[in-house]
Image (tube, grey):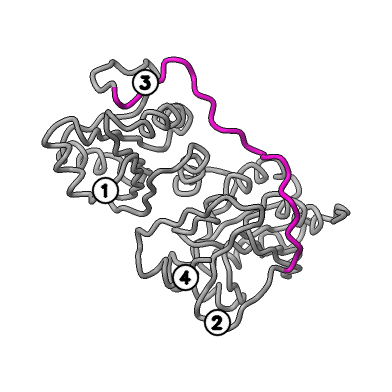
Amino acid sequence: MATVANFLAKPIATVVPRPSAVASTSSFVFFNHKTNSLFRRENLPKRLFSAVKVKAGAASPGKVGTPPAKDEKVQKIHSGEEFDEALKNAKSKLVVAEFATSKSDQSNKIYPFMVELSRTCNDVVFLLVMGDESDKTRELCRREKIEKVPHFSFYKSMEKIHEEEGIEPDQLMGDVLYYGDNHSAVVQLHGRADVEKLIDENRTGGKLIVLDVGLKHCGPCVKVYPTVLKLSRSMSETVVFARMNGDENDSCMEFLKDMNVIEVPTFLFIRDGDICGRYVGSGKGELIGEILRYSGVRVTY
């Protein structure tokens, strides 16, 4: 179990939870005691999400000279100057850069999934750097401290915010959704004032607020977010979904302390202005069950 100190001491640190039958969490260290999840961890149900389906025509990164498919939006980068220019032109959009080599089987395997994501995520910029293409790309990899491929780096406003290596398609999709989700039905909260405003707006009307509290570089938070995103669309008539990263600023961190949030992800359930419960963990089935329970649907465990 990773601690918040590990996340904050290494802003670009990667946390990839190993597959497990139980939900994963990350612990806070500004409390000296441990807590257990409020609810039993059951076996997970069938997955809500299948892997991204790869369409025919998606090239492998090893074929550097092959013309891209007409709808392929992955930009090929051939030098550090091109890389910096692409980050600059992206402005505040999420940039996902894959560093690969022509002889890497793993790079060839995951690249088609990135191509497919580039076709569906119009507000995300995707880049490909072939590290063995030339001296310029090798120098770029050295500059970005790339040691293994495939390596994925995530940038916003020209700043690296996250990185992963050796990941599977589901993890890549989860990362893109988590770090690039700006226009979904999940309300983005950036401090206590945003939380209070959201509560006031939903004090009447009977809707349940589900507040997803996490950290920017928390593997379990990334893992469960596609479920949160899908639920926010399917339950929009009865539930309001919101999200806050505790390490975004001091106001967010103070809010987490006041709410006694010790592990992430933590989901706070709020109705009529009052916190009526919480769920700690990243289990998809458990999360859905708790949301249904606090929505008034009887759930048998």
- Give me the residue at 55% from left, 72% from top: 256
**Kind of residue sitting beneath label 1:** Glu
Quick check: 291 left or right of 86?
A: right
**Kind of residue sitting beneath label 4:** Val
Indicate the quadrant where residue 22 lies. Answer: bottom right
**Kind of residue sitting beneath label 2:** Phe
Q: Is mark 2 on a helix, strand or loop?
A: loop
Q: Is mark 3 on a helix, strand or loop?
A: loop
Which residue was labeled with disc 2? 31
| Residue 252, image x, y percentages | 50, 69
Which of the two discs, 4 and 2, labels the residue nearer the N terminus?
A: 4
Q: Is residue 41 within the magenta segment? A: yes
Quadrant assignment for the C terminus = bottom right
* Gap in angstroms between the C-alphas marked 1 and 4: 25 Å
Which of the two discs, 1 and 4, labels the residue nearer the N terminus?
A: 4
Is disc 3 in contact with disc 2, using a CB cutoff of under 8 Å? no
Which residue was labeled with disc 3? 59
